[in-house]
Image (cartoon, grey):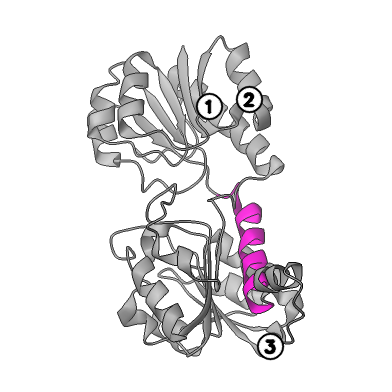
Amino acid sequence: MKILVTVTNYSKYCQAGKRILQDAGCEIIENTSGRPFTAEELEELVGDVDGAIAGADVWSEQIFRAAPKMKVLVRFGVGVDNFDLEAAKRHGIAVCNCPGINTTAVAEQAVALILGLTRQIVWLNKETKEGKWPRIMMHELKNCTVGILGFGSIGRNICEKLKVFSPVLIAYDKYVDEKEAERLGVEMVSFEEVLKRSDVISVNLPAVPETIGIINSQNITKMKNGVYLVNTARGSLVKEKDVAEAIRTGKIAGFATDVYAREPITRENPLLSSDRVIMTPHTSAETYENCETTSCVTAKIVLDVLRGREPENRLV
């Protein structure tokens, strides 16, 4: 069995999962490029693979057509907006993901970015290293309203971690979990109310047709002046040019993101020009703990499908 692994640093950080596949007699093709594969690269690699464990690469009809032996595609993570699920179904390919495993890792990153913005840590670090000694005033989180867009496992975990700072917590989700909201002391409100009331907004929505581009100029105008915005969900949720313009005018006081409309980013990205933007290279889930656990779960899913068993977390 030949398995293509498109996530980077697989041998370095995913030894446990790799051993599971190797012990089952699998040949593993790894991504050593340090970035997601392009469509052309994938097309060249998938011709004789039986399964794939994928990162942020885009899997389309074109790729599935080039992979006649492929039986399973597993997302090394949660979001599958980079997979054409209907095309996979047409080609008889089982698609699975790993919900819940990266919750702690992503929530920690979101909280770190919130603190980085509100305490202006990156800017102050830069100024101090340049020999300056800036005096600025900041607000404490206990005086802030933090709005969570998307109250799934990651959104709830963010709230749990933020509780120690004593902010007012409000959240929006299409599917309201009143029990968890009550446990965490979170007020469930409308999408518009999160925009209107929040001093800090954390975007944790899934990338589905109704959420693509949801952080746009129209919705930004509904936010408070001087709002802080964090995105650890999907780059496609944010209109980067609109956010860059709102930062320029001061409508948005700061933006922190781990995800982008185009990855890796290019020098044309409109967010690069502002020192009020914190950018990390889609590394929220890059923890030793998450990689080890996810590597084992994805390896088991691949082997289950190839051995004719029903896998966990099957989407199609």
Q: Which amino acid does label 1 sit on?
A: Thr
| Secondary structure found at label 2 | helix
Magenta-tinted stretch: 100-119
| Residue holding disc 1 | 32
Q: Which amino acid does label 2 sit on?
A: Ser
Outermost residue to the front: 131
- Contact between labelled residues 1 and 3, with CB atoms less than 8 Å apart: no
Q: Is residue 190 visible?
A: no
| Residue holding disc 2 | 11
Q: Which amino acid does label 3 sit on?
A: His
Indicate whether residue 114 is drawn in magenta: yes
| Secondary structure found at label 1 | loop
The reply, left or right, for residue 182 in relation to residue 196 is right
Q: Nearer the viewer, residue 56 or 91?
A: 56
How many neighbours does mark 3 have within 10 angstroms: few (below 14), some (14-19), or many (20 or more)?
A: few
Indicate whether residue 103 is drawn in magenta: yes
Relative to 19, residue 89 above or below: below
Q: Main secondary structure of the magenta part?
A: helix
> Which residue shows up at 44% across the image and 47% down it?
264
The C terminus lies in quadrant: top left
Residue 63 is tagged as: none
Q: How far apart are marks 2 and 1 (CA)?
A: 10 Å
- Contact between labelled residues 1 and 2, with CB atoms less than 8 Å apart: no
Q: Nearer the viewer, residue 305 or 32?
A: 32
How many neighbours does mark 2 have within 10 angstroms: few (below 14), some (14-19), or many (20 or more)?
A: some
| Residue holding disc 3 | 139
Coordinates of residue 110 in the picture (x, y in percent): 61, 64
> Which residue shows up at 67% across the image and 32% down it?
13
